[in-house]
Image (cartoon, coloured by chain):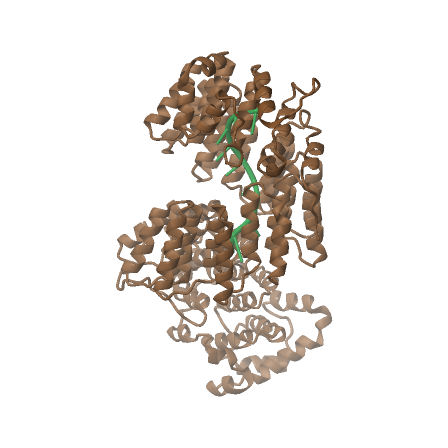
Amino acid sequence: MMLLPVPGSTCFPSIQLASPTLIRHHHHVWPLSATAAAAVTNSSEPHLPPIPSSSTTIHLTSTSRRRRFGDDQAAASPYDFGPLLTFLANSLSSDDDSASSSSSSSSSTSSPTSLDPSEFQLAQSYRAVPAPLWHSLLKSLCASHSSSDIGLAYAVVSWLQKHNLCFSYELLYSILIHALGRSEKLYEAFLLSQRQSLTPLTYNALIGACARNGDLEKALHLMSRMRQDGYRSDFVNYSLIIQSLTRSNKIDSPIMFKLYREIESESIEIDGQLFNDIIAGFAKAGEPSQAVHLLAMVQATGLSPKTATLVAVISALGNSGRVVEAEAIFEEMREGGLQPRTRAYNALLKGYVKAGQLKDAESIVSQMEKSGISPDEHTYSLLIDAYANAGRWESARIVLKEMEASNVQPNSYVFSRILASYRDRGEWQKSFQVLREMKSSGVRPDRHFYNVMIDTFGKSNCLDHAMATFERMLSEGIHPDTVTWNTLIDCHCKSGHHVRAEELFEEMQQSGCAPCATTYNIMINSFGEQQRWDEVKGLLGKMQSQGLLPNIVTYTTLVDIYGKSGRFTDAIECLEVMKSAGMKPSPTMYNALINAYAQRGLSEQALNAFRVMRADGLKPSPLALNSLINAFGEDRRDTEAFSVLQYMKENDLKPDVVTYTTLMKTLIRVDKFCKHLRQSDDFAGMMIRTGHRARVSNIKGNRVPEYGNNDTEYTLYQIAIAETIGLAHLLFEILEQNMNINRTDDNKKSLKYVLISCIPSSSTSIFFPYLLLLSTKYPSRYSSMDTHLSNKVGTEDFE
DNA sequence: CGCATCTCTC
């Protein structure tokens, strides 16, 4: 069970001290270390001296930080440390050529055979100095941030140990480790920690130092070592680690679940701060459910979390489209008397934008303005995003103007959102226009913009443009980051250039950019598609050896690639491994599994996977059901396929284009498609109900489908299916009548011809994603597609 | 801050 702080106030107790790490450690670690150390039989010290209560009051306040040992420090105590420091400074400088050997000898010799009489004298004069004064001397030295002072501090500790002057060496070491950690001298801190067996105090100091310096791998490693040594980690360490993960954006769901499991299984006391950190951590890791669950738990005890925590949860909910819950927390915040600020509004706005709720987005912004909260660049960006996604470019442009009018300079991010929205509509050619517009507004493209631009070209199979953009970015002195490399690598994979992708993966590492989990996921996917299983395993090992945990996408990718290759045992094993790692299987993962069975016509297994998914408490998605239809279709079980359609209707799941397309394919499999198409209006009826009236009536009514809407792909696919079942001649007639297409005997049976020739030159771009997808997926069938396309597309280039 | 990776029909 977790222990909660006494709910005295409605707010989490927040500890605000000059040096929270140090102070909190001291409060909680001392009693712990005293008992824990006493329990360790092989401890070098029989027992720890009682900790003087006065020592807890020695804080690194801002005044003591500024204090120097020569002046007021000496005046504050009856002891003058001047002679000692001079002595140590001299002995340090006398042998700086062999610094390492001198320091190792000074620490290893506990009882020197011969002693300089003057040094002995010096030691004697400090015999009566109480420990807290040594501590504060060390803190003063360490606070100076000068490396020579820290060296001196270290020499003091060694010297004290040598002369047996201060008992609690572990405390001295921990002070040093803290200081070293603060001045980013982690390596030295490590060397120091190896001089003695680690105690809870030094462990905590070291873990804290690592976490604060962002060296999470070491921090986590130390935590597990600490546990192996039989100590319980300080809860402050968890706070520090989670905060550090959040700061560095390295937070993800496996690491959060791992940490949370540890906290639970070790009955770590959770204070208000840690609760805030955990909740915000889960939120930032994209686990809104877990965040909401913990939030409710905490609130049930009468505590209310910090605003930042609530904003993080709102943001996470918004990100996953759970706008209603996001709204609820936003309202809760208001009712709790907290006036939401820009960040909170932005978090909710983000939810509306993600969910495509343009009206709500507009309304929350005006509410915001009414409440006197001024929109910031993020607000405007989100609004522009919303309009761009709705295809309302004019409105987006107006927001841009508003932005300038409100003295919020449009930045590169705004333009990269606009570009991303063009990308998602397949309009990659707009890249150049956006770039021009941005420059005319006096905004320089940054790395983020170039990343989106590379992705836009990459996703449109324009690898040359993608690489040219990359080069251009380099020539402008912008260094590629992991996202840049991941984008480049992935677009080469997607275009089937696996060798080039692998080269880029190497280049990335040679350039000093460390691959992240996403990089590994991309590469694992690539090797999996090539069925290079040994390499897949190799990458998994490599990523873990670098301290990267496989995440949900990693496992899904594995299930997908193993499943698609028919290696179902391996796929299931991945699912099990993931479960045992404490992660909940995602709907996506089950979809991948169901799909794998479906594509091989293993309908019973697909159905079984579907049932397991339901048993796991996951709602069936249209995607899963479409796969199930496909499973029955491929297994020639058309009756069952249609019963899935029935199931969807009864369970309020809207059949979509894919549903009907898959059903069409099912009918083709069992040679019933023509019958349906010609004789029955049922099928047409189904289409009409799902909003595909135009398609059906167009084909049936001998009219060319209308272009310019989102279902164009669907029409093209119908043409393709029609051709496969021998209706091509009919379609050619339709096309000829309406578009004056001349056909030759050579290409009249070619689907490619149909596809390309039905493209009116004015609206080429609508067809691009589809055509490029086809040419990527079936290079042999569509090898010359590129030539056809390049004739149709105006060539545009950088300036 | 954001941008990148996995799942359905061709």
Q: Position of residue A73 (x, y in %)?
A: 50, 84
Task: Depth check: give the residue in front, A332 or A664.
Answer: A664
* The quadrant where residue A55 appears: bottom left
Image colour for chain B is: green
Q: Which image quadrant is residue A81 in?
A: bottom right
Any part of residue A295 in sight: no
Q: Is residue A459 above or below residue A362?
A: above
**Residue A6 at x, y = what percent?**
27, 60
- Chain in brown? A
> Between A381 and A470, which is closer to the camera in this rendering?
A381
Image side of residue A728 versus residue A260, left or right: right
Looking at the rendered structure, the number of numbered marks drawn on it comes to 0
Residue A31 in the image: state x and y as whole percent. Answer: 38, 63
| Above or below, comparing residue A243 to residue A107 in the picture | above
Q: Please indicate, yes or no, whether residue A104 appears anywhere in the rendered image.
A: yes
Question: Measuring 59% from the left and 43% from the top, which residue is drawn there?
Answer: A427
Q: Position of residue A143 (x, y in %)?
A: 53, 74
Residue A119 in the figure: left or right of residue A333: right
Relative depth, front residue between A307 and A323: A323
Left or right: residue A455 compared with residue A364: right
In this view, A131 is above or below A453: below
- Residue B2 lies left or right of residue A149; in this view the side is left
